[in-house]
Amino acid sequence: MSNSDVAFDEFAVLPRWVTWNTELRNGKPNKTPFDPHTNQMARSNDPTTWGTREAAEEAFRQRKPSPPVPGGVGIMLGELGDGRVLGGLAQVQQSRQTELG
């Protein structure tokens, strides 16, 4: 198991999870994050608007937007507070490529 695999498993327990809906902004689709506890808009710089993956998954199952819109569960990126940074997929792919040689 690579370091990236271990880190990926750790994501599930981080309280950085939100739900999201696709909304149009300026005619383009955008993933808008929502707080899994309040179903209000989440903020990328406010961890109090995030929750556990379990909470986000449950909130997504319970929320039934009308009309139905594409959505899902996602994780907020950024500093983890212990010297590590949760980056985007491109960074994870690059890290895995480096490990694989």
Image: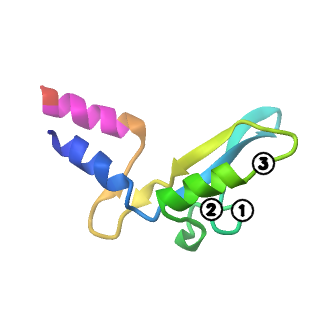
First in sequence: mark 2 vs mark 3:
2
Judging depth in this view, the residue of 23 and 27 nearest the camera is 23
* Residue that label 3 marks: 64
Judging depth in this view, the residue of 83 and 31 nearest the camera is 31
Front tag of 2 and 3: 3
Q: Measured from the top left, where is residue 17 in percent x and y?
A: 51, 57
* Residue name at image x 23 percent, y 42 percent: 4
Q: Report how far apart the C-alphas of labels 1 and 2 lie in the structure.
A: 6 Å
Cβ–Cβ under 8 Å for marks 1 and 2: yes
* Residue name at image x 73 percent, y 64 percent: 40
* Residue that label 2 marks: 36
Query: Identity of the amino acid at label 1?
Result: Asn
Cβ–Cβ under 8 Å for marks 3 and 1: no
Name the secondary structure under disc 2: loop
Looking at the image, is 101 positioned above or below residue 78?
above
- Which image quarter holds the C terminus? top left
Q: Which residues are magenta?
A: 91-99
* Residue name at image x 57 percent, y 70 percent: 46
The label shown at residue 39 is: 1
Query: Identity of the amino acid at label 3?
Result: Lys
Drawn side of residue 24 relative to residue 92, left or right: right
